[in-house]
Amino acid sequence: MNKAALVQKIIAQLAAELEGYMKSARSAHAEATDEQSKAEGKYDTRGLEASYLARGQSRQAAETAEALEQFAALPLRDFGPEDPIDVGAFVEVETKAGSACYFIGPRAGGTEVLQNRRAVLVLTPQSPLGQQLIGRKQGDRWEAQLAGKRVTYCVTSVA
């Protein structure tokens, strides 16, 4: 597993998302401050709604920029079978439904990239599955509730 290449793909995806958020924020800001968005009556809230949208887009852009910085500064180390899972680990997990690949990242949970034709989902230590993975080792098994059903997980590899 080439984690450096994986992290670069995550960074590239976050950079593309950041550009989209910035473009949307600029557009919403322009709409909010446009002369035609000025309220024509007490029930006309177009300008106010556009300003809320601009603020939300700007906040999302700031969070994505922070995630980008954290991934760029993330020290990558190799994890062995006896090392507990932590931030920076690439983890393969198996259930009866199949296997899945995860990268434990500092932020940007839910980001998904393709690596060697496999989907890799970024999990944070704060996410429900991330909380269950942190500290486990290769070969560990456990059960958890998922959509009202008991699911057995097995860590098949940690890198």
Image (spheres, helix red, strand yellow):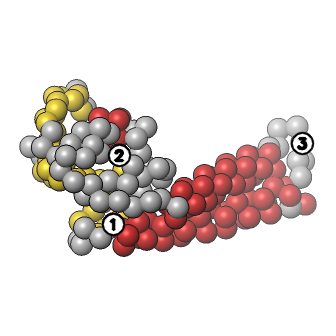
Residue at the location (52% across, 64% down)?
72
Dot in front, 1 or 3: 1
Above or below for 154 versus 38: above
- Number of the label disc, if any, that sits on residue 86: 2
Find the residue positioned furthest to the left. 96
Please state which amino acid type lies under the numbered disc 1: Lys
Above or below for 46 versus 116: above
Q: Specify which label sits upstream in the sequence, 3 or 2.
A: 3
- Number of the label disc, if any, that sits on residue 53: none
Q: Tag 1, which secondary structure?
A: helix
**Residue 27 percent across, percent down from the top left:** 73, 64
Front-lying residue, 10 or 60: 10
Label 2: how many residues lie within 10 Å, few (<14), some (14-19) or many (20+)? many
**Residue 128 percent across, percent down from the top left:** 35, 35
Q: Specify which label sits upstream in the sequence, 1 or 3.
A: 1
* Cα gap from disc 1 to disc 3, whole angstroms: 56 Å
Q: Tag 2, which secondary structure?
A: loop
On the picture, is 143 further left or further right than 23? left
On the picture, is 126 further left or further right than 22? left
Please state which amino acid type lies under the numbered disc 2: Asp
Residue annotated with mark 3: 41
Indicate the quadrant where residue 76 lies: bottom left
Residue at the location (82% across, 38% down)?
43
Please state which amino acid type lies under the numbered disc 3: Gly
